Amino acid sequence: MVAAFPSKAQEAPNPDQTDAGASEETDQPATPLPIERIGLLPDQTPQWLIDAVTREHPNTQPHRLMVAEHNYLALLQPSQKPNNRGLVVLLPDRGQHPDWPLQIRPLRNELSESGWTVLAMALPEPNPPAIPARPVPAPAPTTPETEAEADDGDQEPAAEETEVSAPDAEQPQSPAPAPAQPPTDPEPAPEPAIPAETIVDQLTLQAFTLVEEPLRRNIVLVGVGDGGYWAARWAEQLAAEINSEDEETPRITLKLVLIEARNQLPSQAQTLPSFLQAPMPVLDLIPERTQNQPQQRRLAAQKAGYGGYFRQQHYHPPTAASDQADRRLVNRVKGFIRR
């Protein structure tokens, strides 16, 4: 969102000024008006957003997760029922925040009222792909004609006749050479950007510290768009930890919900289908007329031998805040995680 406001009102011209002065003023370019930009960077979450959430739901707890001098907003909404079912983590799409009105906010509110503790957290923007180096143009091939032109250019022109000045005449002195400038130190190279996967790993570790240990025994990861990629990656990591635990460790259940997920993100070598290698229930909600990427995910789960855990359903993505569209989405997610 961009808003432009003038710094002060422009003064009216003085009628006593001469025409020449007026023409000079009109020739000058107009001073550009200051532009106020409302950023959506992680550590620039507007305070009014947090105030609106806590005003509507006083029990919602806003948290700032710090990673590399940047903070990412997380909204923890406790269960509204005495019997807590477990933890639901909502990962929004790129450019969205933990109170996004489509998909994220309805799920956060409805699941909290159904007995789940819900944690919605912001994610970093994906790293842009590396810019390839500009190729160096090859030198032009030489031909006999170009060699002849080069030889003609090397010949010195005939000396022109010049007047000889008298010996007593003063000769102009050539200017003294400028003193050599000391070499300047090269500018330091910019610090490399922290990979997005490193930031997400640190965010997920901090997120679990906000929730009590008993709630982490029943975990549901829900990702929208890019958040689906990170949710699947996180689910694979948790599944590996669950399988490596001993028999005395309390049993942990894990489910994954993908909503309009993307299989590939910029600068990420792995794809989402490569994370579907563990026996966990997966609900993949896909828009209609979307075939290629959902098919890749389904085939990856079948190839790993867990096709029976993988369910795909078509649904109509909401184009605006609509109670009917939100209700259908919430009912599908609630029905899946209740099993």
Image (spheres, rainbow, N blue to C red):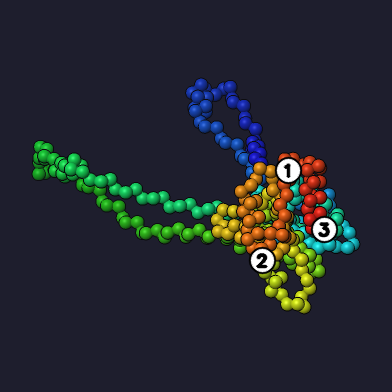
**Residue 152 drawn above or below residue 208:** above
Q: Earlier in the sequence, mark 3 or mark 2?
A: 2
Mark 3 residue element: loop
Residue located 30% across and 52% down the image: 178
| In this rendering, the label closer to the viewer, 2 or 1 | 1
Q: Is residue 180 left or right of residue 306?
A: left
Check disc 2: other Cα within 10 Å, few if <14, some if 14-19, many if 20+. some
| In this rendering, the label closer to the viewer, 3 or 2 | 3
Amino acid identity at mark 1: His
Give the Cα separation between the discs numbered 2 and 1. Answer: 30 Å
Residue located 77% across and 59% down the image: 88
Give the Cα separation between the discs numbered 3 and 2. Answer: 23 Å
Q: Are marks 3 and 1 in contact (CB under 8 Å)?
A: no
Horizontal and vertical percent position of residue 297: 64, 55
Farthest residue in the right direction?
82
Q: Quadrant of residue 324?
A: top right
Q: Which of marks 3 and 1 is nearer the N terminus?
A: 1
Q: Choose between 131 and 167: the one closer to the eye.
A: 131
Give the Cα separation between the discs numbered 3 and 1. Answer: 22 Å
Mark 2 residue element: helix
Residue 237: mark: 2
Residue 338: mark: 3
Check disc 1: other Cα within 10 Å, few if <14, some if 14-19, many if 20+. few
Q: Choose between 82 and 123: the one closer to the eye.
A: 82
Q: In which quarter of the image is the N terminus?
A: top right
Residue 186 visible to the viewer? yes
Mark 1 residue element: loop
Residue on which disc 1 sits: 316
Check disc 3: other Cα within 10 Å, few if <14, some if 14-19, many if 20+. few
**Residue 213 drawn above or below residue 180:** below
